[in-house]
Image (cartoon, rainbow, N blue to C red):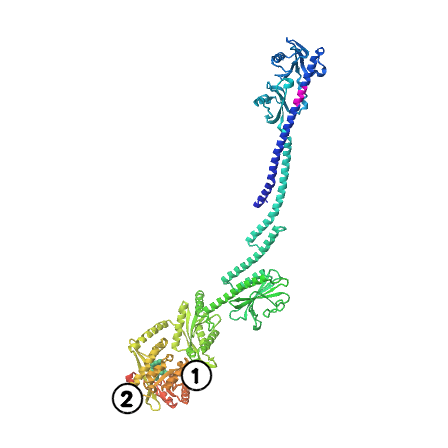
Amino acid sequence: MLRSRVGRRVFLLFVACALVPLVVMAALSLSQVRDLLIDQGNTRIASIAKGYALAVYERMLTARDAALLIASQPENATSIPPSIDNQYLFLGRFDERGHVASIKGAPPAEVAKLVAEYRGMASPPATWVRSTEGEKLFLLAADPADTARGLLVAELNPAYVWGDADELKAGMIICVVDSTHLQYVYCRNGRELGLPGLLSSAGPNQEPGNVTWSKEGVMYRGKVWAQFMKNDFGAKDWYYAVSVPEDDLLALVHAFRRSFGLVVALSLLLIIWFSVRQIRAMLTPLGDLTAGTRRIAENDFSTRVNVNSDDEFGELGEAFDSMSVRLGRQFHISRAHADIDRMILGREDLERITEATLRHLRLLVPALQIHGFLLDRADPLSGRRVSLRAVDGETANTLRVESIQIPESARPDLAGIVPARRVDSGTPPDWASADEPAGTDGQWVQPLVWGRVVCGWLWIISPGDETIGEEDCRTISDLAGRLALAISSAWREDELYQQAHFDPLTGLPNRLLFSDRLQREIARGKRESRLSAVLFIDLDHFKAVNDSQGHGAGDFLLCEAARRITATIRDSDTVSRHGGDEFTVLLADIREHRDALRAGEAIIAALSAPFTVAGQACFLSATVGIAIHPDNGSSAEELLKNADTAMYRAKVAGRGQSLFFEEKMNAETVARLAIDRELRQALERGELELYFQPQVSLASYQVVAAEALLRWNHPQRGLLGPGEFIAVAEESGLISQIGRWVIEEACRQIVGWRGEGLVLERLSVNVSARQFRDADFVEHIFRHVVSTGLASSIEFEITETAMLERMDLLMDKLKAIADAGCSIALDDFGTGYSSLAYLKKLTVHVVKIDRAFIEDIDKSTESLAFVEAIIAMAHALGKTVIAEGVENEEQVRLLQERRCDIVQGYRFSKPLARAEFLAFAKAHVRG
Ligand code: C2E
Ligand code: MG
Ligand code: MG
């Protein structure tokens, strides 16, 4: 108790408050009592002194009178009656001559001197008392019998005069001093005190009054009484000094002191007992409260202080307990917040965050079960349910996580619910599965809303006897807000990840994710020394479909192509959309190079099957380039670049095939870049030139027309054919410029030949698909061909690939050109994938059968049948048929038999330079 500072203080206060007045009072009364006692003592001593003095005086008078009486009867004057005998030591008469007549005893030595002294006095008193040294007392008076100078002298018996000492208290000092001679007349006990000196210092006429002295350490107090002697005994006052030890006077004070000490000790004990009780009554709850506060500081909110008193401390304890309950709850809520926030920031799994939220809620609100419904971002009717159930209503829980599908009809209407709301008890909502307990328990629903989007809800089942109060509802919606934040951030992260790593159209991984996986595979391949392959896939003819059928169709095709590619490969492989109509495939862990080739072929086969777009069959194919890790590169970039190069090479070599990357292809790429650069200059420097190949009518064997074919007089490499540079020009877009030059040059030739007398029915020029995309293509033709009146002399050759580009656009442009009078030829007929139906739809006047079919008509009956069918069909549609690449007479004969209209080929002439052609044509044109 006294370890507590407050305890000490209160204790001291108590002691001080009670003890100080007690002690002060005691001291006061003690001094008063002491004064009183001393006063009383003094009075008593004074009366003793006075009484004693009077008694002595009385006895001296008696002794005088008796002596005078004896002396006055001379007959009796020789003896003393025995009754008064004890009064005198000596009694006798002195006559004038100095004779002594003794009545009793012998005269003492000093008598003569005293007699002389008496007689020497001027007016001697009737009776004179004289004390001498040795405390002898003499009485002198005129002899009554002999008045002529006879004297009566008596020496008084001290025993008689001073009386029985026993009648005075033992220890009391009584001394009598003769003030005439300042000497003791009588002294009992206190001779050594030197009373005569004391009296002389007090002055001759002064009463000494009170006297105090000490002897052997004992204090004495006394009183001096002056006894008047003059009248009866003719002497100065006698001083009677009576004194007693102070302790005798203060015996009462000592007794009082003793009992007072006892009282003080008792009251001190009482005070201690009382104050201890009080302090304990104060300190115990105070200590409990302090301990409680300390516990709160240490985050222990569970213990109660339980102050059991009916005073303010009790009230304080109650308030403290309820405060600690509230604080505990508040603390728990903030800890739950911090917990959930930490998990959100730490990007923990959403299910784990939900579990943590539910666990916190279970402790904060009375709930038997809490279910968290987390909806999927993409599909709000499916998601997961995290359920926390109390085991036997206690704090132990079971946790279950399951995927759920919510029927559209059972979707809870959560609009407008902000804090948790009670839902109809007894009828579990449809989205609760059948095993949920129905009945008396209250059910509460709390939507999880973020940014006005419902991303889930909480379903809380409370026990029947406890209900969820308003504060609980606030807690629920508070934590629900956090959970909603977690879901929304998971959603957003998912969305961002999707956006960053997946192609929004096809849902395939994008470049980024692909190269990430490729890098991992490369690292793994290095570790486990295994092979993997990168396939670079380019859809052939996709642009044509996209342009002709619209982007919707294009998108559909891309999705379908993605699906087909994905279907051909293993789950462990990755397909990604690289961009546009390009896809890449990562074949992880292949056994041999051929596996990659087989996969490439399978993909091509899958993509070659017809696609149905808006009810129409549509044909695509694909070209695949393959790069193998580790043979063709050690980094993702390198492998992708090389696969791309391989794909490009495959495309050049003939679409619809797979090719491995070879090292020399890199060199080819470099060369292609050089061609592109040089070709631009070639146009400016006039290095391009048109060659002409005659077309011979089988009906007349005359040159009726010619095809203009482009040549490049390369300063270093000599004359180059279009196969060497047209593809590059198409790729770079330079073909538009070149194409325009070709048309203009062809027109110039026609005009030139006419000037020289050569008039052909037609001169055909080749037009790349790419040229049709130029906005001013038709306009250019009108300006240079139509407006110069050459429309009917020009024929435009388009290949089937051109038809795959935007069909509608192409149709319009062809029609415009045809309407202007130009002729249209379908070049390389039979090699593409275009439907024969196009022949009917498009404005085409001439069909040019590809050299590939003509090549072996003299050897293969199938080819012949094919050519025959084309001729028949084209004729049926009213089109002219030209056979290309006719090299021998047999082919001419067969074609003639099959009623082919015109032939073109080395059988008649190779493409010729302008002058040579002019000479050749003039020789073979019917004048
Ligand atoms: P094409 O339009 O099918 O031209 C016919 C090609 O077959 C020419 O090759 C020609 O020399 C060749 N040829 C003709 N008769 C025979 C034969 O009996 N035997 C063999 N083996 N070949 C024969 P060339 O000149 O190398 O042209 C190749 C392709 O280049 C042309 O095919 C055409 O598509 C394209 N081309 C040529 N000039 C131009 C042009 O000015 N513009 C555009 N866009 N393309 C052009
Ligand atoms: Mg041609
Ligand atoms: Mg051709």
Report the quarter where the C terminus lies. Answer: bottom left
Residue 697 is covered by the magenta coloring: no
Residue 62 in which image quadrant: top right
Name the amino acid, label 2: Gly
**Residue position for label 1:** 835
> Height in image: 462 above or below 570?
above
Indicate the position of residue 668 as horizontal and vertical percent values: 35, 73
The quarter of the image that holds ligand 1 is bottom left
Residue 757 got which mark?
A: 2
Q: Main secondary structure of the magenta part?
A: helix
- Image side of residue 607 versus residue 891, left or right: right
Is label 1 in a helix, a strand or a loop?
A: loop
- Image side of residue 26 versus residue 541, left or right: right
Nearest the viewer among 486 and 327 is 327
Q: Which residues are magenta?
A: 52-59
Of circles 2 and 1, the one toward us is 2
Nearest the viewer among 781 and 533 is 781
Earlier sequence position, callout 2 versus callout 1: 2
> Height in image: 689 above or below 481?
below
Name the amino acid, label 1: Ser
Indicate the position of residue 534 as horizontal and vertical percent values: 43, 71
